[in-house]
Structures are given as C-alpha cells and as structure tokens.
Amino acid sequence: MGDSPEDTGTPRTSPTTDTSPVTAVLVRPPRTVDTLVRYLLTACLVRTASGGAAVGLFTLAVRTGGSGGATLGGVLAALLTAPYVVGPWLAGVLDRALDARRVLAASFVLFGVALAAAALLLGRIHFLVVAGLVTVAGMCGPLVTGGLSSRLAAMDGWDEHGRRRAEGWDSATYGVGNTFGPAAVGAVGAALGARTAVLCLGAAAALAAFTLLTLPAGAPPVKGTEPLRVRQTFRIIATVGQLRRVMVAMALTALVAGGITVVATTLGRQLAGSAEAGAALAAVYGFGYLAGSVAAGIVPLPGEPERTSTLLVAVSAATVACCAVAPSYTVAVVTFAATGAAGALLFTATLAVRSVHAPPEARAQVYVSMGALKMAVSSAGTALAGSLMALGPRMLLGAGCAVTLFALASVLGDRRISARRNPVPVTEGDSSVRSKSRKFSSPIP
C-alpha cells in the first residue's frame, strides 16, 4: 500500500532484464484539483437554487396572492423543508446505486422542474397543485445537501490533507447558497420579476445535474451487501462513538444557530434603532459563516476531526456569549461575524468526522440522516426563537450559550465514559475503524 506509485507520487521505472534503456513510467496522480472545481461548481449551482427557493416562492406568493399571499408563501416555504424527514429513506438509494451520480442528477433535475412548474402555476391554478409540486421539490432537498456531500467523501484520489481542504470548500458552498440564493432572487426579481427569479433557480438546479455527471463515479457498492434499513443507519450513528458525539453537538448547536438570525435582527434593531440595521446584523452572521468556510477551504482544519469539532463547540459557546453581552452595534457586528465563522468551521469538522467514521456501505445514509436531523432541529430553533422573542434577544442568546455549553459537556462526558469502557484509543485511519465499518456493512438484527 504505502510503496505504490499512487501513494508516493514519485516516478518508478519498470523492471527490465535486457540491455535496452530503462523506460521511466510516470504515474500521474488523480486530477483532484480539477475534480474539486467541478464539484464546487455543481454544489454552488444547486445549493444556490435551494437556498433561494423559499425566498423566491414567498415573494412570488405575496405578489400574486393578494391579502393572503404572505400566509400562502409561508406554507410553501415550510413545504420545502418539511420533506427532509424522508431523507434517510432516500439516502439508501444512493448507497445501493451502481452510479450515484445519476441518482443525484435526476434529483437535481426533478427539483428544478418542480420548482419552475410551481412558479409558473402559482396564482393560475389551484393552490394544492402548487403545494404538491413544492413538496416534490422539497423531497429532493436531502440529496442536495447531505447526499451531494457524501459523494465528495466517496471520491478516490484524495490524501488526508486534500480531503480536509475539499470538505472546507464544500462547507463554503452551503454559505454561498444561503447567502447568494436570496440575493439572486432579489436582484433578478427587481429587474425581471419574482416569477422569472424562481425560474432561474430551477434552471440552475438543472444545470448542476449536467456538471455533476462530469465528476468521477466513485466506487460501486460492494456485491452481496444487503442495503441497511433506516433503523440500522440510526443504530450505526448511535453506537459509533464519534458519530454519536458529533450528532449530539450538531443537533444542539443547530438549535441555537436556527434562531440566531431572528435574534440578530431584533438585537440589531435595538442597538441601532432601525430595522435595516437589524437585517444587516443578520446578514453579517451569514457572511461570517461564508468567510469561515472559505478559510477552512484555504487552510484545512488540523488535528483529529472529532477533537477539532469538540474544540469548536467550545469556541461557539464563547462567541454566542460575546453576542449576548455586546455593548454596541459595532461590537455586535464583530461577535455575530465570529459566531457565523465558528459555526462554519464546526460544520466542516463534522463533515470530516462523517467521512472518517461513516461505514462506506452506508455513507450516504449517515450523511443524509444526520443532515436531516440537523435541518429539523434548526427549523425548530427558528420557530422557538420567534415564539420566545418577548424574553428579549440578550436573554435568548444567553440561553443559546447555555445550550451550547450543555452540548460541550455531553460530548466530553460521553468521550470519558467511552474511554473507560475501551481504553485503547481509536485514531483516524486506524484499522479498528475500518473493521467497525465492515461490521456494520452487514444487516443489524
């Protein structure tokens, strides 16, 4: 393994027994940079479409629905995220597919077509038909997020440093989608109308399907391996310590992150005295997230992924605490940007944990299941922050800090208990991790 040309990247000469000149055989490493660029283009296109879809449909519903347009728009926005609960079942299709690219490409096209059709028909046909189309688009959401990220982990040719860097850039595409998706809707909507803006999002998703097919196919599923059921996937997450702990950290920090923009909008308005300042503070959090994920792409996160994620949970708690006590708008801008950056770095670290410890035979199911739970908890955090805003933004930020500290304590406590039960440390790339992956590749009774 370690002395193969692919591992060392050095030229080797073919052995010869005659007197002819020795011919040097240069084994070129995989074109990982080119692959990463095409992956990022695909991810940015489809995640921008996903990130702007809710804003686009809401805006269109308000403009075409009369006095009840806001209510209809809210229903359509909810229907885009509610179907994430079926993500674990959809992910099994990816793990069983001979070529997962085709499954993803089909889901991207379906997302784009359903979204565009909903935009064209909204206000012109019965609302239930439009709601059905939006639900179909929402069912593709888990494959746009965790399903696509799982393919990056499945590609061959990356060394450990390169894979961490790729995961950092993958995290950045989420920030690009959530930041520039709504911005694109606003810009195109102002120039050509909200309906055209949503149609452009649908076209971007369909284009992403074509760029996706240019990526390497990855290894096919192992022959003779039976597909895992959803309950077996969740059992893997619950029994593999690294996955269990990072899931706890993801869920609890997502509860806080889901409400952070709502809280930022209110706090910014109180500190600066204008609604525009509140919206700008919420945008600062988004740009901080984008900056943090770009930084992780340029300089990969060091160290063992789970330890890094634990450290970043502590950093997140500190930054949320700083937001709660920010004495001025200027200080709040800095602290909310730092909170966004810490969230991006934490998400990147969780991607690394999943890529290292998720069994290859159930990688997509683990990615999507954890991502779906994160989305559900984040949505709950948004709703909870809105309903409790009467307590005040600083009180809510203090509660968010407490929740994040509880996540940190839970992870550290779990690790200590696991260390007592199994004193042999499991390091990244250890054969015990691979044997555990093989163990879970068979059906679990």
Image (spheres, rainbow, N blue to C red):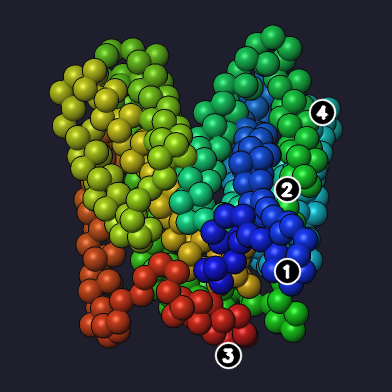
Residue at screen point 58% across, 86% down: 444
Return the disc, 1 or 3, that comes first in the chain's sequence. Answer: 1
Give the residue type that dot 2 points to.
Answer: Leu
On the rendered structure, is 11 left or right of 161? right
Q: Judge whether residue 372 can be spotted in this image.
A: no
Return the disc, 2 or 3, that comes first in the chain's sequence. Answer: 2
On the rendered structure, is 394 left or right of 142? left
On the rendered structure, is 42 left or right of 268? right
- Residue 30 sits above or below residue 98 on the image: above
Q: Are marks 3 and 4 in contact (CB under 8 Å)?
A: no
Cα distance in 3D space between marks 2 and 3: 36 Å
- Badge 4: residue crowd in 10 Å (few <14, some 14–19, many ≥20): some
Residue that badge 3 annotates: 445
Residue that badge 4 annotates: 120
Give the residue type that dot 3 points to.
Answer: Pro
Residue that badge 2 annotates: 215
Return the disc, 4 or 2, that comes first in the chain's sequence. Answer: 4
- Total numbered badges shown on the rendered structure: 4
- Residue 210 sits above or below residue 370 on the image: above
Residue that badge 1 annotates: 16
Return the disc, 1 or 4, that comes first in the chain's sequence. Answer: 1
Image quadrant occupied by the N terminus? bottom right
Q: Position of residue 77 (x, y in %)?
A: 61, 38
Q: Residue furthest front?
A: 19
Give the residue type that dot 4 points to.
Answer: Leu
Residue at screen point 51% across, 61% down: 355
Residue at screen point 69% across, 69% down: 15
